[in-house]
Amino acid sequence: MTETTHSPALRVDIISDVVCPWCAVGYNQLAFAARRAGVALDIHWQPFELNPDMAPEGEDLREHLAAKYGSTAEQSAQVRAQLTEMGEALGFTFRFFDGMRIYNTFQAHQLIEWAEEQGKGHEMKQALLRAYFTDGKNVSDPEVLVETTESLGLDGASARAALESGKHADNVRQREAFWVQQGIRGVPAMVFNGRHLVTGAQGVETYARILEQLGATEGEYR
């Protein structure tokens, strides 16, 4: 996917998960910085599962964060408030709620890959982020995935068939393994022009400086 500004475009591989709030923030910060700077981005979404072994029913988000990171209820509330405010400033709506659950996303990544074949991989990624964080939907539910597909004007029956057959499963696994082998342990992680790694959601001003530095040191984006 290429953000339409000036060309040539700067390739950015974004390793992320659709249940990662900082991935939504980081991408939107980067996109904001690029639009302001007039830099075209050639975005390539790369799969990463925060919870590859999670059961199909998922887990209570707050309980999951407490067990995984030791977050208290107060800390979770503070982070949710921070994310909500940051998202609002970037045009992305977070709607956290008590009882919100977190899910495995292996099928969601397969759907993004299927959509990429239809020329809609970026749109699918954004739609799944909204489905989870804005609409509170279970993005591991095949019915939700088909519904999301159809919301983009794509064929739900074809998407369902692709998911049921698992035709993209091996490739998603291979791509996930590749990025882990490159040392990616947390997301978002962004690789600019195939060689400059930036981790975490860095903020609009930091991304603006990165784009400026890449333009100065590498000349044309390619």
Image (tube, rainbow, N blue to C red):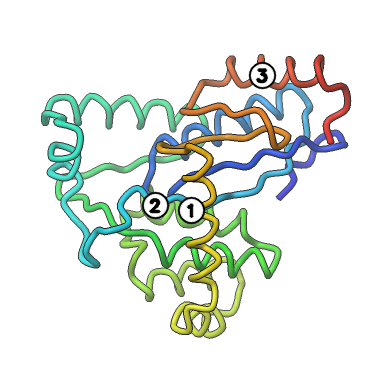
Residue 180 position, x and y percent, is 47, 45
Q: Amino acid at mark 3?
A: Ile
Residue 135 position, x and y percent, is 36, 54
Residue behind mark 3: 210
Is mark 3 in CB contact (under 8 Å) with mark 2? no
Residue behind mark 1: 177
Q: Amino acid at mark 2?
A: Glu
Q: Along the line of sight, which residue is nearer the eye, 207 or 53? A: 53
Q: Along the line of sight, which residue is nearer the eye, 62 or 162? A: 162
Residue behind mark 2: 49
The answer to which image quadrant residue 59 occupies is: bottom left
What SS does tag 1 mark?
helix
Between the C-alphas of marks 3 and 2, the distance is: 26 Å
Ranked by sequence position, the earlier of labels 1 and 3 is 1
112 vs 221, left or right, is: left
| Position of 163 relative to 211 (above/below) | below
Circle 3 Cα neighbour tier, 10 Å, few/some/many (<14 / 14–19 / ≥20): some
Q: Along the line of sight, which residue is nearer the eye, 130 or 215? A: 215
| Residue lying at 40% horizontally and 36% vertically, measured from the top left | 186
Q: Nearer the viewer, mark 2 or mark 1?
A: 1
Residue 28 position, x and y percent, is 55, 34
Between the C-alphas of marks 1 and 3, the distance is: 27 Å
